[in-house]
Amino acid sequence: MSRDKTLYSCAECGGTTPKWLGQCPHCRAWNTLTEALAEPATARNRYGQGHALNAAQPVAPLSAIEASEVARAASGIEELDRVLGGGIVEGGVVLIGGDPGIGKSTLLLQALDALQRAGLPTLYVTGEESGAQVALRSRRLGLEHSQVQVLAETQLEKILATVEATQPAVAVIDSIQTIYSDQLASAPGSVAQVRECAAHLTRAAKGTGVAMVLVGHVTKEGALAGPRVLEHMVDTVLYFEGDTHSNFRLVRAIKNRFGAVNEIGVFAMTERGLRGVSNPSAIFLSQHSEPVPGSCVLVTLEGTRPMLVEIQALVDGGGPSPRRLSVGLERDRLAMLLAVLNRHAGVACGDQDVFVNAVGGVRISEPAADLAVMLSITSSLRSRALPKGFIAFGEVGLAGEVRPAPRGQERLREAAKLGFTVAVIPKANAPRQPIEGLEIHAVERIEEAMSVVRGLG
């Protein structure tokens, strides 16, 4: 295969140079040159004929374009289908990342086996393991008779040729950082290789209708390794979350063109692989025989699913430099809530160490957790437990007002279904009709919430 000429392109100005330099000769920016492939003068399409993202269409108004539902294939794993928006989309490209050993390859091998059993041809391309290692994992998962096709290969051109020859419905590339193209001189995993290989695989998926699942490495900070354009190319980006020392894993959709964003799937790691958890609220609630100080149950919303999570707080004697530590919650927001507590509710923690934790390793980013966090801190500081069966949610502003949370009715119904009996919520979320078995206290300010809790105690 003839090698095309290699150029180096500047990420700032787009200028090119035939050799790598520390400084761009055009815009004088430092360390912005990355390897790029120069198009031969005779080539009409560097990605090959027939692999365009979409066939050319005439310009038309939106109202005249027929919008049809995308075809989906159920993966056989209900929690994975939930995160994907209902199943794997024909021609869709999914990027999944997570820490080493968290279960990415295990989950995908299980999904491919279920799809194969359902009559869909599948292909598992492994660039990090040999075929024998993949077979050994399948034995551990109880998939001794699996008919999933396995290809141990890292060269992009051979992988594309195999996909074209076998025509699978779903192909998994494990991982994109190990794949390289002969048309580039850089090593596998470099910015240029990852970008070019992902672009070729994406175009192959769109041109042939094969659903591609790309496994991506993550950096020390937990972000997907490689250029950010990698996440823009694909249709869906999933992150594996959870502690490798725990049996539970979360798969969260960060981007999804065919479903809800921030949807999560909850899995339990067993001897036979990952199994979906039908009632995830149970794993995020500690089993206390009696109410304990510093504990408050929050009804949070993950995608389309209301979920109950226990928020625990510990306020202890500090010193000249008190510590503020949060696990699963934003630390900067914790400092803001402590200031609001002091100013508007008269609860001073300035000389105390404050530790806040979301049980079960779940990460909560929505502001509706504010009220539960503040109530748990106050409960720990005063050594008074909240009532049994108590839940709370609501955003708290800097002026001390309690703001509504989205889809409050669904949160309340989920709490009532799980046996909770008392709720402190924003006044704007108060239901028009009472919810059976649930005593609701609607408040407008944080002072009212504290007064209600004291009355319940």
Image (cartoon, rainbow, N blue to C red):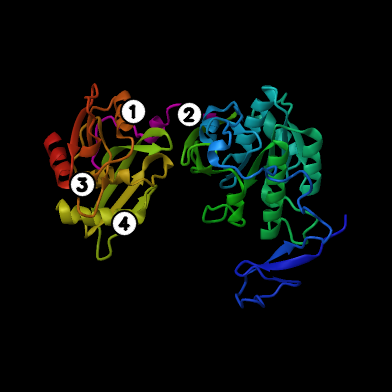
Marking on residue 414: 1
Tell me: residue 399, above or below residue 452.
below
Nearer-N-terminus badge (3/2):
2
* 95 with respect to 454 (left or right): right
Whether the residues at callouts 4 and 2 have beta carbons within 8 Å, the answer is no
Kind of residue at disc 3: Thr
Instruction: Provide the residue designation for mark 4.
Output: 324
Instruction: Provide the residue designation for mark 2.
Output: 277
Magenta segment range? 275-294
Whether the residues at callouts 4 and 1 have beta carbons within 8 Å, the answer is no
Marking on residue 193: none
Nearer-N-terminus badge (4/2):
2
Kind of residue at disc 2: Val
Number of the front mark, 1 or 3: 1
Nearer-N-terminus badge (3/4):
4
Q: Secondary structure at mark 2?
A: loop
Instruction: Provide the residue designation for mark 3.
Output: 378
Nearer-N-terminus badge (4/1):
4
Nearer-N-terminus badge (1/2):
2
Identified at 74% across, 26% down, the residue is: 147
Identified at 51% across, 29% down, the residue is: 276
Q: Is residue 285 magenta?
A: yes
Position in image of residue 23 (x %, y %)? 64, 76
Kind of residue at disc 1: Glu
Number of the front mark, 4 or 2: 2
Q: Secondary structure at mark 3?
A: helix
Q: Secondary structure at mark 1?
A: helix
